[in-house]
Image: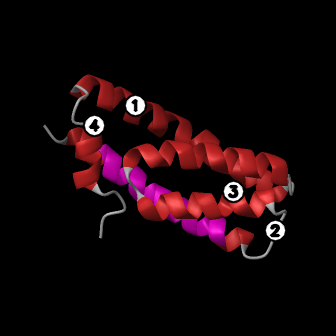
Amino acid sequence: MAVIDFVQLNENFQYYDREIITEVIDIFLDEYDDRISNLEKNIAEKDFKALAFNAHSLKSVIANYMAPKALELSGRLEEKGLNHSEEGLIELFAELKDTTKEMLQELKDYLQKP
């Protein structure tokens, strides 16, 4: 099952030309490793304020790509940061990381289509 709702994605991007869509996706792909590293660092350092900020930022970007599970997980991670909650934090981050990796592959595949 796809992480991204491509029907909705295509509908949202219908008024943009392919070059713009490619550029927006490429920016996300380029920034992804840094975003994940920052979250990992925030968790390791128990910097909940930064965790909430960085999870919110990732959530905002994910919202563009119609990936409901990744959106929900990033929102839950943001809540953990806001509530200074460590319970299940590592597992939640691992699930978000796995889901967003699937999302990245789907976006890369999407860019390969004519």
SS label for mark 1: helix
The residue tagged 3 is 78
Contact check, label 4 and label 2, Cβ < 8 Å? no
Distance of label 1 from label 3 (alpha carbons): 23 Å
Q: Residues within 10 Å of mark 2 (few under 14, many from 20)?
A: few
**Where residue 85 is drawn, which disc sits there?**
2
Contact check, label 2 and label 1, Cβ < 8 Å? no
SS label for mark 2: loop
Q: Residues within 10 Å of mark 1 (few under 14, many from 20)?
A: few
Q: Tag 2: residue type?
A: Ser
Question: The C terminus is located in which quarter?
Answer: top left
Query: Does the magenta segment cover residue 88?
Result: no
Query: In the image, residue 41 lies at what x, y percent?
Result: 77, 50
**Where residue 13 is drawn, which disc sits there?**
4
The residue tagged 1 is 24
**Nearer-N-terminus badge (2/3):** 3
Distance of label 2 from label 3 (alpha carbons): 10 Å
Tell me if residue 50 can be seen.
yes
Q: Tag 4: residue type?
A: Phe
**Nearer-N-terminus badge (3/4):** 4
**Nearer-N-terminus badge (1/3):** 1
